[in-house]
């Protein structure tokens, strides 16, 4: 993994605050830069990149792990708090040079992972923009901290979808809804509904002045909010959790900060949209194959490892083209976030109403790794906000084989649409894929579509008989007359009579194994 522009450990701690992370023990000197965030898996060989902030999920005794991380020049280890810091643990930090951080019990590992990645991305955007403009435009977290400090209040900056894009470090001074908002990076749906029902958003977006919000809940602080706008376009809002109304000077400062936030959001949106578009185009090159696929895979850092393709679509599939594309884009974002817990290099894009992910398989057993990934996808498909069916293709051993893995994943989706499963690998539904391919051939080929089964179907319709059902049961019982009669709830002699009629009507020679195979397949693909 190539190290990307990152952020100092001090900045991460300042931006996230004690709501998420706290320092247990820090070496002297402290780590200079965090380049990436990684998840420690005790079942995998530990080899994090230099400068990594490692999430020690399930780590009870961090001493040995700190020493291992020190050999790879990692920046910090995060374990679940509270921690009992003794002298051996302090010595492990001193020897390794790796900072030991404590994670709040209120934050899930997934939330911590996404929050740290957001700060790192913000640092990367700052560096790109500084090269272009000579200054750091994208420092939304720094702006939130500055406003929070100046007004002595916890501040969040949210986009138009009520997603938190930055927040000040003093969120512990607010209340439970604010803590839930910061940890989830999204205003909880129930609070969005309450705000909407009380006309808060309508008032907020109608004026450029701060709006006082008090829903009358004794356990919730009032809020002061101001719209963040660029001209007539509403980009989001800035919110402060307060214990009293702002003074006139504080209101002017709050409004001025919202104008600065608008510049930041516009710059950040432009950079993110450009980067997202370029990356999506690279993913589509790899998915479709062709002359540019291998170069695109190298630019995505996916050229040197086995890969497999995941395809997902909403379970309530839209027929309208525009609606399908929008639903696929939303699903693609959710899929990317879900898979990022286990794999930072996953590449995603949407195309033709389907969300795709290319998974790099980095262990010695790619097949087993893809099976484990399918387990993670089962949790994703069950999420109410996802509501998806997910198919996984075979392992692609080089970028040239990715289109075949994508075709597999698409075919699995076709099978899942008509079944009760939400997720499957291609090898788990191979028999249904086989029959589906035969069904497609039969639809286009009159010689395959017509034949003995059609003659029996017509006879049943005219005589109210059950020759097709009898033939299907007979083949399912491998020609066992007694079992077939029991399944059909008829006497064996009745069954023998029906078998004779089947031969007379259709001309089938049921003693011929090739005939039994062919007619059995035709019954299957026609749903007989």
Image (cartoon, helix red, strand yellow):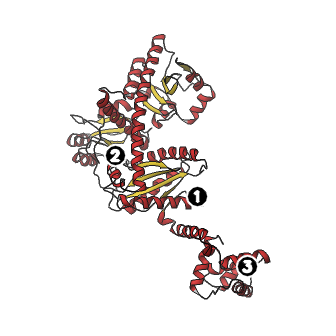
The residue pinned by badge 1 equals 417
Badge count: 3
In the shown orientation, is residue 132 left or right of residue 407? left
Please state the horizontal and vertical placement of residue 94, each as a whole percent of the image: 21, 39
* Pointer 2 local density, CA inside 10 Å: few below 14, some 14–19, many at least 20: many
The residue lying furthest to the right in this view is: 463
| Residue plotted at (32% across, 48% down) | 299
Query: Element type at marker 1?
Result: helix
Q: Nearer the viewer, mark 3 or mark 1?
A: 1
The residue that disc 2 covers is 38
3 or 1: tag closer to the N-terminus: 1
Give the number of the disc on residue 489: 3
Q: Residues under labels 1 and 2: Cα distance?
A: 35 Å
- Whether 477 is drawn above or below 416: the answer is below
Image location of residue 40, percent across then percent down:
34, 49
Q: Residues within 10 Å of mark 3 (few under 14, many from 20)?
A: few
Judge left or right: residue 286 versus residue 486.
left
Q: Residues within 10 Å of mark 1 (few under 14, many from 20)?
A: some
Query: Where, quadrant-wise, is the C terminus in this rendering?
Result: bottom right
Report the Cα–Cα distance between label 3 and label 1. 33 Å
Q: Which mark is residue 271?
A: none
């Amino acid at each position: 993994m190539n190290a990307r522009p990152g952020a100092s450990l001090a900045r991460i701690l300042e931006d996230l605050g004690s709501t998420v992370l706290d320092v247990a023990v820090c070496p002297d000197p402290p780590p200079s830069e965090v380049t990436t965030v990684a998840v420690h898996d005790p079942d995998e060989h530990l080899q994090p990149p230099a400068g990594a902030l490692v999430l020690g999920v399930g780590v009870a005794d961090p001493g040995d792990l700190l020493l291992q991380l020190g050999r790879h020049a990692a920046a910090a280890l995060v374990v679940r708090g509270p921690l009992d810091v003794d002298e051996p643990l302090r010595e492990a930090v001193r020897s390794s040079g790796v900072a030991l951080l404590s994670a709040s019990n209120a934050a899930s590992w997934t939330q911590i992972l996404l929050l740290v990645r957001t700060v790192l991305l913000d640092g990367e955007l700052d560096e790109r923009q500084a090269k272009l403009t000579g200054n750091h435009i994208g420092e939304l977290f720094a702006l939130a901290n500055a406003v929070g400090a100046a007004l002595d209040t916890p501040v969040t900056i949210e986009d138009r979808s009520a997603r938190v894009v930055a927040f000040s470090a003093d969120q512990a001074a607010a209340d439970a809804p604010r803590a839930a908002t910061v940890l989830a990076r999204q205003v909880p749906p129930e609070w969005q509904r309450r705000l909407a029902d009380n006309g808060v958003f309508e008032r907020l977006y109608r004026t450029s002045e701060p709006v006082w919000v008090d829903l009358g809940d004794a356990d919730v602080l009032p809020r002061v909010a101001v719209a963040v706008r660029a001209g007539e376009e509403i980009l989001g809002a800035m919110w402060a959790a307060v214990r009293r109304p702002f003074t006139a000077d504080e209101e002017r400062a709050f409004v001025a900060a919202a104008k600065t936030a608008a510049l930041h959001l516009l710059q950040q949106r432009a950079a993110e949209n450009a980067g997202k578009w370029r990356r999506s185009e690279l993913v589509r090159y790899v998915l479709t194959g062709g002359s540019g696929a291998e170069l695109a895979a190298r630019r995505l850092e996916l050229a040197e490892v086995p890969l497999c393709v995941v395809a997902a679509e909403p379970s309530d599939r839209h027929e309208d083209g525009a609606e399908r594309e929008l639903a696929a884009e939303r699903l693609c974002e959710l899929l990317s976030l879900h898979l990022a817990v286990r794999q930072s290099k996953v590449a995603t894009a949407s195309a033709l109403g389907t969300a795709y992910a290319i998974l790099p398989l980095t262990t010695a057993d790619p097949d087993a790794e893809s099976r484990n990934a399918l387990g993670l996808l089962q949790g994703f498909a069950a999420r109410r906000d996802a509501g998806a069916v997910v198919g996984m293709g075979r392992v692609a051993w080089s970028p040239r084989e990715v289109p075949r893995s994508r075709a597999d994943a698409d075919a699995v989706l076709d099978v899942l649409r008509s079944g009760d499963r939400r997720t499957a690998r291609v090898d788990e539904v191979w028999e249904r894929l086989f029959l589906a391919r035969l069904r497609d051939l039969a639809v286009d080929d009159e010689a395959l579509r017509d034949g003995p089964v059609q003659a029996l179907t017509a006879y049943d319709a005219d005589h109210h008989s059950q020759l097709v059902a009898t033939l299907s049961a007979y083949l399912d019982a491998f020609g066992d007359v007694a079992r077939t009669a029991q399944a059909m709830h008829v006497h064996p002699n009745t069954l023998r009579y029906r078998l004779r009629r089947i031969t007379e009507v259709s001309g089938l020679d049921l003693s011929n194994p090739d005939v039994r195979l062919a007619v059995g397949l035709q019954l299957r693909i026609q749903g007989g």
